[in-house]
Amino acid sequence: MVEVQKLNDTHRVRSVKQGIQVNFAQTGKIGRFSVQVLIVNLCSGLGMMAIATVVVDAIGTTPSSTSTTRHARHTRHTAHTHDTTRM
């Protein structure tokens, strides 16, 4: 869209507007507040957060096969390094 605005006989402003126009139309009814629905939604949200916490803790505390192998190598190495009876 090109818009020309005349300021005086020697000056004018030319505005070029480009883009996408988005129109919103709101329809429908506004619902009423319900304490029962609020309690159900709160309990559902807390329950999902509890399940997510359990899943993340289970994944985070389960050792992988590479960490147990690395731990076994580390303990073997440190057993020889810190053995004072061999000196």
Image (spheres, rainbow, N blue to C red):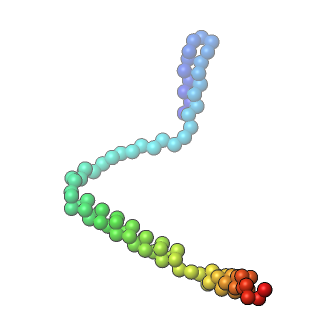
Q: Nearer the viewer, residue 47 or 11?
A: 47
For this orientation, the residue located farthest to the right is 87
Q: Is residue 71 above or below residue 20?
A: below
Q: How many marks?
A: 0
Residue 4 on image: x %, y %: 56, 23
Residue 70 on image: x %, y %: 67, 82
Image-based side of 17 in relation to 28, left or right: right
Residue 62 on image: x %, y %: 53, 80
Image-based side of 63 in relation to 87, left or right: left
Q: Is residue 40 above or below residue 82?
A: above
Q: Is residue 62 above or below residue 7?
A: below
Residue 7 on image: x %, y %: 56, 15
The picture quadrant where one finds residue 38 is: bottom left
Say whether residue 76 is visible. Answer: yes
Q: Nearer the viewer, residue 81 or 58?
A: 81
> Which residue is depicted at the point 73% across and 84% down?
84
> Which residue is depicted at the point 48% across and 77% down?
58
- The C terminus appears in which quarter of the rendering? bottom right
Q: Is residue 4 above or below residue 48?
A: above
> Which residue is depicted at the point 54% across and 40% down?
19
- The N terminus appears in which quarter of the rendering? top right
Say whether residue 69 is visible. Answer: no
The picture quadrant where one finds residue 5 is: top right
For this orientation, the residue located farthest to the bottom is 86
